[in-house]
Amino acid sequence: MCGAELHTRTQAAWAVLAEVPDPEVPAISVCDLGIVRDVEMAHDGQLTVVLTPTYSGCPATEVITESVLAALDAAGLGPALVRMQRAPAWTTDWISPAGRDKLRAYGIAPPGPVGGEVRVPMHLVGGLAQSAARSVDLRLGSLGAAPASALACPRCDSTNTERLSAFGSTACKALYRCLACREPFEHFKPI
């Protein structure tokens, strides 16, 4: 394959991956979640998707792998391979701004910055994180995590909230209640 064909197939793969939902939070794609680290295309056209799981032992990792491969096959881009990259470890700072908006619209309070400073090479093309020559170093989490009392309700935006449980429907979420609108909601924990 020539360079232009490889580039076109890579772009098509990113577009397909941007539509693959996270199985635990289907309102957000695996790209918006920030777990798709790269799409590699060999000269023979072999596609490899590099994923970073949200945490070691995440029960959704196998389902995500199967969903990614099935979506690429359905789009005529398969057979593909998936390679896990565990370092650097995934952080909620990698969730895209669009992904945070989708979480909020779904009724889940998005995580705040983790804190500290982590430099992560992100490759941005057309608003999607991609492997490309245009690369920038993002400083993540340099603002520090917001205090729990400042957690805004995703339904009414009130910060008059309280944590009910450190764990929600999945290990990566906590259960909160808004004292203004009295509605329970989950909060995606910053990690």
Image: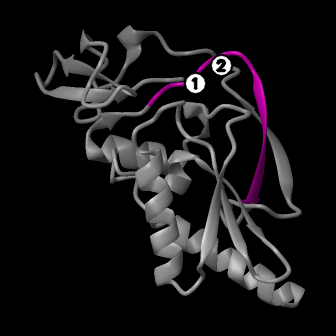
Identity of the residue drawn at 34% across and 53% down:
27
User: Taking 18 as reference, is 188 left or right?
Assistant: left
Vertical relation: 156 (above or below) 42: above
Q: Could you say which quadrant of the image residue 178 lies in?
A: top left
Q: Residue at x 84, y 47 (%)?
A: 136
Query: What residue is shown at x 31% (from left), y 36% (from top)?
Result: 108
Q: Quadrant of the N terminus?
A: bottom right
- Quarter of the image containing the C terminus? top right
Give the residue pinned by disc 1: 113
Q: Is residue 120 magenta?
A: yes
Label 2 Cα neighbours within 10 Å, binned few <14 / some 14-19 / many ≥20: few
The image quadrant of residue 29 is bottom left
At which x and y percent is residue 134?
A: 86, 60
x and y, in percent, of residue 94 in the image: 61, 39
Distance Cα–Cα, label 1 vs label 2: 7 Å
Q: Amino acid at mark 1?
A: Pro
Graded by Cα atoms within 10 Å as few (under 14), some (14 to 19) or many (20 or more), the crowding at tag 1 reads many
- Describe residue 136's horizontal placement relative to residue 83 as left or right: right
**Rendered image coloring scheme:** one colour
- In percent of width and height, residue 110 lies at 42, 33
Q: Which residues are magenta?
A: 111-124
Q: Is residue 22 left or right of residue 184?
A: right
Instruction: Decide: is 110 above or below 159.
Output: below
Instruction: Name the residue tied to disc 2.
Output: 143
User: Which numbered disc flags the more N-terminal residue, 1 or 2?
Assistant: 1
Question: Is label 1 in contact with label 2 (beta carbons under 8 Å)?
Answer: yes
Horizontal side of residue 131 vs 157, given as left or right = right
- Element assignment for label 2: loop
Mark 1 falls on what kind of element?
A: loop
**Among the 4 quarters of the image, the one containing residue 41:** bottom right
